[in-house]
Image: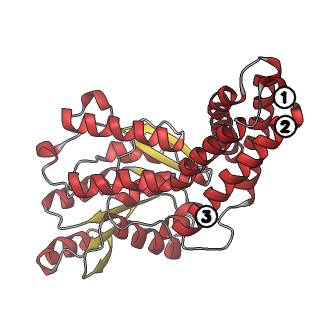
Amino acid sequence: MIILIPAYKPDEKFLRFLDDIYSRTDFKVVAVDDGGGSAFDSIFEAAASKGVEVIRYEKNRGKGGALKVGFRYIAEHYPNEYVVTADCDGQHTVPDILSVASRLEGKKNTLVLGCRSIKDMPLRSKAGNTITKIFFCIFTGKLLTETQTGVRGVTPDLFLPFCDIKGDRFEYEMNMLIKCVDDGVCFDEAPISTTYIEDNKSTHFNGLRDGYRIYSLMVKSRAAEFLGFFAFNIAALLLSLLFTPESYSLIGISLTAVCALSLRFIVMFVTKAVSAKNLLFPYRLRDVVCGAVCAAVIIAALNIFVLLLGLTLSEAVFVAIPISFAIRFLLRALKQSLKK
């Protein structure tokens, strides 16, 4: 087991944290000096004397950049070890690390989140965490107890994929969660203590700047899906004007759905290709299969709602779309359960 600690301008709390780790565990510790400067040489020299493997570079890259450097180093030197990430400011305790580590052993393709009790958080943190996890659930369909935790357990097969995640600062950790949802990585959660030292005074998190990055990337990550959603609805509603209730038929309704769905997937393809700066096909086989299943559900639902339940085609469109999203979330959950 390895503890990975990104450290930007650490103080004596970092050294006390290391002492606690070594007195209570036999874990290796890898610390990344995130370009704090020569003023912190003595701190990292003291850490190295305790047995910490210290990675240093001159220019500050941000927390995400430091984590990626650490994951790459561990992938090269300790490819079969599990990793628990922790902050250097004393907010995370050794029992927190042990709680997360206990959920990792023997697992593959899994991210373990150390989750604090939101009811015990200060009001500002409670509000921020609650809003963020609600937004995350809306945009990804995955409800997590906490999305902003820095204590995370990572299985070895995820080291290199995590090195390729975009973002070098606090938004990196949100991108990590989004990637895990999209790639079918399994989530697990471990309870940890709710600790705020001096009302989180030592944090380098900028509420306005980093908050904007976090929320904007959630929107960007699902831009293709939302644009495709609107394209389908507009196309289906316009095409429904060509029909009267007397002219509804299985073939007509199915062709309407296929045309609207085709526009939806074209919009999604173009949006995703442009955002990824990759004009080649930006989807994997499982994405195509999932899309095909959802399309079949929409076509079947439209015919059932119109021909059997007597709804108009425009009414059926609004009823069928939530069902397609529900099917997509169920398929994602099934994919994760099969990988456990």
Residue named by callout 3: 270
Vertical side of 212 occupied by 43: above or below:
below
- How many dots with numbers? 3
Label 1 or label 2, whichever comes before in sequence order: 1
In percent of width and height, residue 193 lies at 30, 37
Q: Kindly report which numbered mark, 3 or 1, lies closer to the viewer in this rendering.
A: 1
Residue named by callout 2: 252
* Helix, strand or loop under label 3: helix
Q: Mark 3 is on which residue type?
A: Val
Label 2 or label 3, whichever comes before in sequence order: 2
Q: Kindly report which numbered mark, 1 or 2, lies closer to the viewer in this rendering.
A: 1
**Mark on residue 263?**
none
Residue 154 visible from this viewpoint: no
Q: Nearer the viewer, residue 114 or 61?
A: 61
In percent of width and height, residue 5 lies at 33, 62
* Helix, strand or loop under label 1: helix
The reply to whether the C-beta atoms of the residues labelled 1 and 2 are less than 8 Å apart is yes
**Mark on residue 247?**
1
Q: Is residue 186 left or right of residue 67?
A: right
Q: Mark 2 is on which residue type?
A: Gly
* Helix, strand or loop under label 2: helix
Q: Is residue 89 left or right of residue 326?
A: left
